[in-house]
Image (cartoon, rainbow, N blue to C red):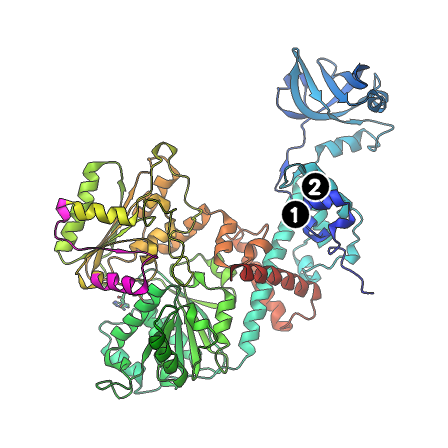
């Protein structure tokens, strides 16, 4: 029989009732229980001078027993009372029992003259302070504490407080933990952190760390234990990412070197603007990697409006020039359709391959989404499979099994956070040889998040926006002031009259529906996700959130907007309706577009100049930054009005003020992250991470993550599959198993 892992023992071996209660917390094995770390530590009851005791305090007092009496209270029940003193004041200890006999042992323990530690909550009964059912540790004698010193040490220990369930209190969990932890033997428990790394940083072993967090002697203990467990979490995650990166890097890709006189050259020659320095630098970086026979694995981060699309398109053209195809994966149908439109627009007759009037070396841009009519879908699939389309743009539909490519050389994933690693893999699997991968983020993300969520990718950053942009002015506008409201719509009117377009974003579709429409036809959340940065709205101002359909009706009735076309766009429209609404907006036929956050990511209408966000306090910082990035993209200055009923002095109000004051996306992203409940960042960004990251915080633990990343890369360099570190390997597998489970749950 195999030696079994002592952390893999089912809790049912403890006892059935305990196992059942712990099961409610999702804990089924000894390892689960030991990884159920205390949420916090209670101050050990402080040794207190009794005169200063206050009702409601949890205290430990050193005192001497003065007298003890036990008396029956009827029906066999009993009451034990004991008076203790610190030499000056006195308090009572009170114990009830269902049977008087049960108190006899206690009576013997609390003999007059004995001293000890008494811990409990101070209450008052008939003007006398008392401790009800205190914990008693008597010095010297029949207790487990051997002497005064030891008892004092025990009493000084931080008390671990566990996330508990009803009916199974924290201290019962502590007890169960001890049952599992106490008999553990160091040598039987595999430690995911290799010894040389432990030694370098003087980290405790896994078993030591578990003892330090569950049974600390003092704060330094649990701090030290937690630090080590936190590092372990970072190391496991980074080792997985490093291993995955190394694995892909070992694969062969088809080299796609640039071709002189090809599509890319033709495109560059007719580009209506000059590339920014950043676009050029990143472009060269990407071009070099595409030219090599190793798969590129790159993350392109960029400020809103920094021109990521052009960088991606140039990479795609290089691949097409080299005889391959590129797929562009977008998170929503709206975005996919827009990308196709944008790419065709940028390419002009270079995208009319096979058509009369197309340029000689032209290719084709195919659009493939789930809701396409059968004929169009079939045509797009044929173009992808035959290679007639050099560029295939699509949603999740691209991942479906019946979609084939002639020679997929590059996968570009736009606006990443809605695609997991698994989906990237699914698309990769469609290529004969591993394609190059370029992932683009919608907004800047803080470095630690990039390292954590995209740790397997190399990062490039576009931080500047093209010159000539007029910039965006942002104002926070109070919702309840009619004068301001009028002014808002007058501004919209002025912009429209000047040839501009205005977005009006609302948190919901109609009055009855719950906040946000459920999903678009891809099953992708398009709108207001429960955003953890969103504080509860001002309780005094509870009122229904503004809804697209209501607002559109309201605006159509306004005199100051008379004659202005007002369109609506939301996830419940059919794809054709969406397309139509969008086209009417872009063309100026309906220059005011009332919508949900469907316009949040990537939508690009250069004439758009105003972004009005209603109930702006309901959106997160990054989301608002992304939204306002939709305006001021052409040569006209942008205006963003954040309308909200949030009262000055509230967090929600402060967030809007911050947005009004800053346009630096990286700064805002870092702030956003700080305000979020940390687990959510990863939970939202990457499947399943919430479950394997218990202590690690991307906001606070930047240095731990960076150190773990360097260490993990070094380990993988020497031992690509980590075969030499079975415990680390096991920990990676366990974390991946959780990730897959959640992925499957969602699928
Ligand atoms: P994002 O990085 O937010 O995805 P886009 O790629 O959508 O930004 O680009 C925003 C707008 O800027 C587009 O209209 C694009 O054509 C334009 N653009 C891109 N690069 C430049 C440049 N170097 N000079 C001027 N305009 C540019
Ligand atoms: Mg974009």
Q: Residue at x 46, y 72 (%)?
A: 399
Q: Nearer the viewer, residue 336 or 297?
A: 336
Residue tagged 2 = 173
Q: Which residues are magenta?
A: 559-584
Q: Position of residue 360 (x, y in %)?
A: 26, 88
**Most extreme residue toward the front, as rendered?**
374
**568 drawn magenta:** yes
Figure check: 677 above or below 62 = below
Q: Residue at x 14, y 58 (%)?
A: 499
Q: Secondary structure at mark 1?
A: loop
Q: Is 448 left or right of 102, judged from the image as shown?
A: left
Tell me if label 2 and label 1 are in contact, CB under 8 Å.
Answer: yes
**Most extreme residue toward the top, as rendered?**
127
Which of pointers 2 and 1 lies earlier in the amino acid sequence? 1
Q: Which mark is residue 36?
A: 1
Q: Secondary structure at mark 2?
A: helix
Q: Position of residue 312 (x, y in %)?
A: 36, 72
Q: Residue at x 70, y 41 (%)?
A: 173
Q: Position of residue 410 (x, y in %)?
A: 42, 77
Q: Nearer the viewer, residue 734 or 573?
A: 573
**156 drawn magenta:** no
Residue 316 in sight here: no
Q: Nearer the viewer, residue 185 or 502?
A: 502
């Amino acid at each position: 029989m195999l030696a079994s892992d002592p952390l893999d023992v089912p809790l049912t071996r403890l006892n059935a009732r305990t196992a059942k209660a712990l099961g409610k917390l999702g804990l089924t094995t000894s390892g689960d229980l030991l990884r159920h770390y205390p949420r916090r530590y209670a101050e050990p009851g402080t040794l207190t001078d009794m005169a200063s005791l206050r009702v409601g305090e949890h205290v430990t007092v050193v005192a001497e027993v003065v007298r003890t009496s036990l008396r029956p209270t009827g029906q066999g029940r009993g009451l034990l009372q004991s008076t203790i003193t610190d030499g000056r004041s006195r308090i009572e200890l009170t114990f009830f029992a269902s049977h008087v006999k049960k108190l006899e042992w206690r009576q013997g323990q609390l003999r007059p003259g004995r001293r000890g530690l008494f811990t409990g909550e101070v209450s008052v009964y008939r003007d006398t302070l008392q401790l009800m059912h205190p914990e008693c540790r008597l010095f010297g004698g029949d207790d487990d504490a051997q002497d005064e010193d030891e008892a004092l040490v025990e009493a000084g220990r931080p008390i671990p407080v566990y996330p508990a369930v009803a009916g199974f209190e924290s201290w019962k969990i502590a007890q169960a933990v001890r049952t599992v932890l106490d008999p553990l033997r160091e040598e039987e428990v595999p430690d995911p952190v290799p010894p040389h790394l432990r030694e370098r940083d003087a980290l405790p072993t896994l078993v030591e760390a578990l003892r330090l967090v569950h049974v600390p002697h003092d704060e330094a203990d649990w701090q030290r234990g937690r630090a080590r467990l936190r590092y372990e979490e970072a190391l496991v995650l980074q080792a997985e990412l490093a291993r995955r990166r190394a694995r892909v890097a070992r694969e062969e890709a088809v080299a796609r070197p640039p071709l002189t006189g090809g599509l890319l050259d033709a495109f560059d020659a007719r580009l209506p603007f000059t590339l920014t320095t950043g676009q050029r630098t990143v472009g060269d970086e990407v071009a070099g990697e595409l030219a090599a026979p190793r798969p590129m694995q790159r993350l392109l981060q960029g400020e809103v409006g920094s021109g990521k699309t052009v960088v991606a398109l140039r990479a795609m053209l290089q691949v097409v020039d080299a005889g391959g195809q590129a797929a562009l994966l977008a998170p929503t149908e709206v975005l996919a359709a827009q990308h196709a439109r944008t790419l065709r627009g940028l390419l002009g007759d270079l995208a009319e391959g096979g058509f009369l009037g197309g340029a000689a070396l032209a290719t084709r841009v195919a659009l493939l989404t789930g809701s396409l009519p059968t004929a169009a879908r079939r045509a797009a699939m044929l173009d992808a499979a035959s290679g007639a389309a050099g560029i295939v743009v699509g949603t999740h539909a691209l991942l479906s099994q019946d979609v084939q490519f002639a020679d997929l050389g590059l996968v570009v994933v736009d606006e990443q956070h809605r695609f997991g690693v698994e989906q990237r893999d699914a698309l990769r699997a469609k290529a004969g040889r591993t394609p190059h991968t370029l992932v683009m983020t919608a907004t800047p993300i803080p470095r630690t998040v990039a390292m954590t969520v995209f740790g397997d990718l190399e990062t490039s950053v576009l931080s500047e926006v093209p010159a000539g942009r007029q910039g965006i002015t942002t104002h926070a506008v109070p919702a309840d002031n009619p004068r301001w409201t009028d002014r808002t719509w007058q501004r919209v009117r002025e912009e429209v009259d000047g040839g501009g377009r205005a977005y009006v974003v609302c948190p919901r579709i109609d009055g009855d529906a719950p906040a946000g429409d459920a999903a678009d036809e891809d099953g992708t959340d398009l709108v207001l996700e429960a955003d953890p940065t969103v504080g509860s709205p001002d309780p005094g101002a509870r009122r229904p959130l503004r809804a697209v359909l209501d607002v559109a009706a309201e605006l159509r009735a306004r005199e100051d907007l008379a004659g202005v076309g007002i369109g609506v766009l939301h996830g419940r429209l059919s794809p054709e309706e969406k397309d139509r609404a969008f086209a009417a907006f872009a063309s100026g036929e309906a220059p005011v577009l009332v919508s949900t956050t469907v316009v949040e990511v990537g939508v690009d209408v250069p004439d758009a100049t105003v972004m009005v966000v209603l109930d702006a306090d309901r959106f997160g910082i990054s989301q608002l930054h992304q939204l306002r990035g939709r305006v001021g993209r052409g040569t006209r200055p942008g205006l963003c009005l954040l309308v909200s009923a949030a009262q000055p002095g509230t967090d929600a109000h402060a967030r809007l003020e911050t947005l009004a004051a800053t346009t630096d996306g990286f700064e805002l992203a870092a702030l956003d992250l700080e305000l979020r409940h940390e687990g959510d960042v990863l939970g939202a960004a990457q499947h399943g991470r919430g479950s394997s990251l218990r202590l690690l915080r991307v906001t606070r633990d930047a240095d731990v993550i960076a150190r773990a990343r360097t260490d993990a890369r070094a380990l993988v360099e020497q031992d690509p599959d980590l075969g030499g570190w079975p415990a680390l390997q096991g920990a990676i597998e366990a974390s991946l198993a959780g990730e897959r489970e959640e992925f499957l749950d969602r699928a």
